[in-house]
Each structure stands twice: as C-alpha cells, then as structure tokens.
Amino acid sequence: TQKEVVATLKHFEDLKPVVDTYVFNDGSQTELLCLCGTIPVKIKANTYNIPVCIWLTEFHPEIPPLVYVRPTGNMVINESKHVDMNGRVYMPYLHEWTHVSTKCYSGTNSHM
C-alpha cells in the first residue's frame, strides 16, 4: 500500500495525504488515510480538475478505496450513475476491484 500511495501522489501531484476521521453509513468512525486534492477528469473534450477524497481502509488493498467528490464552496455535485448525491463515486473498476490484478501508474499494483 505504501508503494501504491507514493506512486499515486507522484502521478497526481495535487493529492495530499492526511489522516482524518471517516464516518461510515452506520455512524461508526475511524481514523483513515485520505488522499485529498484534485485530479484531472476528461469530460467530452474538456479536462476539469475535480476535488476528491480517496479513503484507504485498514483492509486496503484487499478492498477498494472509498472515493468521494468533494466540491468546493462554489461547486455543486451533479448526481449521475457514477456519483451519488453525497459525492460517493461508483465506477466499474471500484466495483470490480481485485487487488491482485490492479495496476498503478508506476507499473506496480494499484487502482488509484
């Protein structure tokens, strides 16, 4: 996981690692590593820097990261098939996550 995080931070230079409190749907809380910042997302012919939080649980890489769009004050979340009204991201590669066959930007294993 450490190698994956380092490679991800090198690839997405705006992401910063922080340890913060994550609140699960059942209300339970835990301290998790979060990669927060913006990532470039191509939508049609335009690239937008989307603010995200990528949470890694203690079970990573066996389970996928929890990814959220975190809009700035002047942004609104547009709910879609890939993003719910809370900003939670649902992408096929997160749903079909298998840590053994994942690939990172540096050539090591990762999905971030």
Image (cartoon, helix red, strand yellow):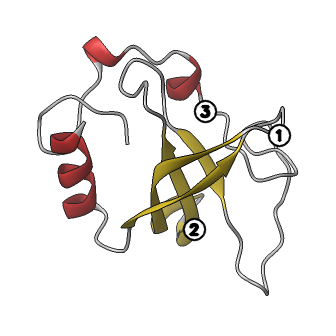
Q: Nearer the viewer, residue 29 or 4?
A: 29
* Residue on which the image places disc 2: 50
Mark 2 or mark 1: which is in front? 1
Disc 2 marks a residue whose amino acid type is Ile
Q: CA distance from mark 3 to mark 2?
A: 15 Å
- Looking at the image, is mark 2 or mark 1 earlier in the sequence? 1
* Residue on which the image places disc 1: 27
Q: CA distance from mark 3 to mark 1?
A: 24 Å
| Residue 46 versus residue 35 in the image, above or below | below
In the rendered structure, find residue 91 and report the number of the disc placed on it. 3
Circle 3 sits in a helix, a strand or a loop, which is it? loop
Q: Could you say where residue 110 lies in the image, as x and y percent from the top left?
A: 28, 33
| Residue 86 versus residue 3 in the image, above or below | below
| Residue 86 versus residue 41 in the image, above or below | above
Q: Could you say where residue 12 lies in the image, as x and y percent from the top left?
A: 31, 63
Circle 2 sits in a helix, a strand or a loop, which is it? strand
